[in-house]
Image: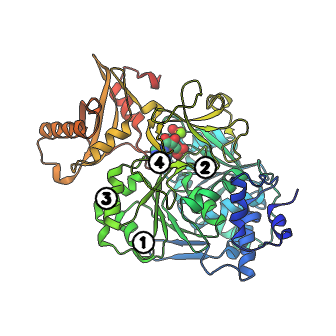
Amino acid sequence: LQSPWVLLQQAKRCTASLIPSYYEAVIRGEQEVPEYFNFASDVVDKWSQEEKDGKRSHNPAFWWVNSQNKEVKWSFEELAFLSRKAANVLSGPCGLQRGDRIMAVLPRIPEWWLLILACIRTGVIFIPGTSQLTAKDISYRMEASRAKCIVVTDTAAVAVDSILSECKFLKTKLIVSDRGRDGWLNFSDLFQAASGDHDCVKTRSEESMLIYFTSGSTGSPKMVEHSHSSYGIGFTSSGRHWMNLSPSAVFWNTSDPGWVKTVWSNLFAPWIHGSCAFVHHLPQFEPTVILNTLVKYPITTFCTAPTAYRMLVQHNASSYKFRNLKHCVTGGEPLNPEVFQQWKSQTGLDLHEGYGQTETVTICANAKGMKIKPGSMGKASSPYDVQIVDEHGNIQPPGKEGDVAIRIKPKQPFCLFSKYIDDPEKTAATIRGNFYITGDRAVKDEEGYFWFVGRADDVINSSGYRIGPFEVESALMEHPAVVESAVVSSPDPIRGEVVKAFIILSPAFLSRDPEDLIRELQDHVKKSTAPYKYPRKIEFVQELPKTAAGKIQRNILRKREWGKVKHPYDL
Ligand code: ATP
Ligand code: MG
């Protein structure tokens, strides 16, 4: 069987735009998933050839900036060349072979992009971790993944050295730093010396490419395995329709490289479309830095988490003139309709929400041009057949709440994870009848729009009523006193459990009498949604527990509420 590109050339249809077109046909099921696929040779090197042949515009492939006005801009040709050098570092001095695993705990630095491509070129399996990981987190991940190599910058190197005795499988330590460190190979030195010639391995589509630890919003992070084709090809359709990507697009997504959203939106989706992946180093999330970056650079599509949009609308985005921004995207958590409205009124732009998991590609999205219903995650995204099912795996009619599920029979979509590594039980537990069960609850309406209710274990059961936290949080957000909130269950002697809201107040309301304000907020929720959903308990807090990806950890608040009394979901 030929590589897809050879097939295209044979068909004498070799124009740049056919790179994504071919893979969109794969997503639509009009073409077979190629037997062999490698993102470095089949996508990056092909765009590089397009550039050499003068068929691609001057839009960079990669554009990195930091707050000190330092910039790195690479074309696909440069990216291809530099990632070959990085590949030679891995297979040469690092001694890594196809199938070995490398863990990368790096901030948003250009080397991260070279290293992941180098892994794809050599068949080494890449395991990203966020630079906020502690020594304990790293130790857990190194042990679980049996990674032979770790690559870090100075800060994490200290953490790694403190847990060396626990890392039984670790053979090579690689540091990205302008200084040397005892016992560590220096990436920059080796990279300078490495050759730019490298033969990319020929990988079968289903061969393992990436391992991701989930965000850990609900428990210990799980190791999710993805193949070369699942993430490599799986974003072609949502990249075009949800993220609005094309060869002239400049796409900035702010997520941390430890989170799956970075490969979705800073790598596979933009590069398969020949777009520019824009990255800001962003050591901290500073709303004014974000807004000023959108003013300064010609970013056409912007993506950040709902929690970040909640912060941005507090900074009156209408006073900033964005240079080229046309399309805004979000996902990872539910987006409250109130935040959608505020962003729209401040910038004139719609927020296109999408929904997915580490285990999947985009499951649902609000595509460009589609009617947006604020508060909805949009419609099923190709190639997934997404349904709401009951506890027996039966499809539920519109309007009925159930589990969000992806059809996997008779044929499992190629762009679904292969398994939770070393955990056949957890893997098997995701399958019910003909479906993969996401663990999220939602309702589908008559027009095929999905409405998120909550993670299955965040749904509150009060006196027999099932209450999704998202609806209560969204109702609270409509009140000017509320900057952010998290709604969880709390024990109650009569009702079993009741709704409790943890709320961060807007500064203007801090001086208000708390009892009065609690009553006012409760009355507001009773009017805005079905009255039985109102939070019987409210606590004002200064911050909410969040994962490294910025997601609210309701399970931590729930455990705190239940104290010694175990909630059934936490048993
Ligand atoms: P863990 O599985 O370890 O608990 P996690 O589920 O948070 O962590 P991710 O895979 O990063 O790890 O997150 C996927 C989850 O995020 C989804 O299952 C869903 O609960 C939530 N999510 C993602 N996008 C949306 C969205 N648009 N609306 C609502 N929830 C979303
Ligand atoms: Mg999950």
Query: Residue 416, can we see it?
Result: yes
Label 1 residue SS: helix
Mark 4 close to ligand 1, CB under 8 Å: yes
Mark 3 vs 4: CB contact within 8 A: no
Compared to 518, does 382 lie above or below?
below
Label 4 residue SS: loop
Residue at (83%, 70%) from the top-left corner? 9
Q: CA distance from mark 1 to mark 4?
A: 27 Å
- Neighbor class of circle 3 (other Cα within 10 Å; few <14, some 14-19, many 20+) is some
Task: Give the label, 1 or 4, closer to the camera.
Answer: 4
Instruction: Determine whether, in the image, residue 124 is placed left or right of residue 425.
Output: right
The residue tagged 1 is 293
- Neighbor class of circle 2 (other Cα within 10 Å; few <14, some 14-19, many 20+) is many
Instruction: Determine whether, in the image, residue 294 is placed left or right of residue 183.
Output: left
Q: Earlier in the sequence, mark 3 or mark 1?
A: 1
Q: Residue furthest top?
A: 494
Residue at (54%, 51%) from the top-left corner? 259
Q: Earlier in the sequence, mark 3 or mark 2?
A: 3
Q: CA distance from mark 3 to mark 4?
A: 18 Å
Residue 66 place in picture, x, y as percent: 47, 71
Residue type at mark 4 is: Met
Q: Earlier in the sequence, mark 1 or mark 4?
A: 1
The residue tagged 2 is 361
Label 2 residue SS: loop
The residue tagged 4 is 377
Q: CA distance from mark 3 to mark 2?
A: 28 Å
Tag shown at residue 342: 3
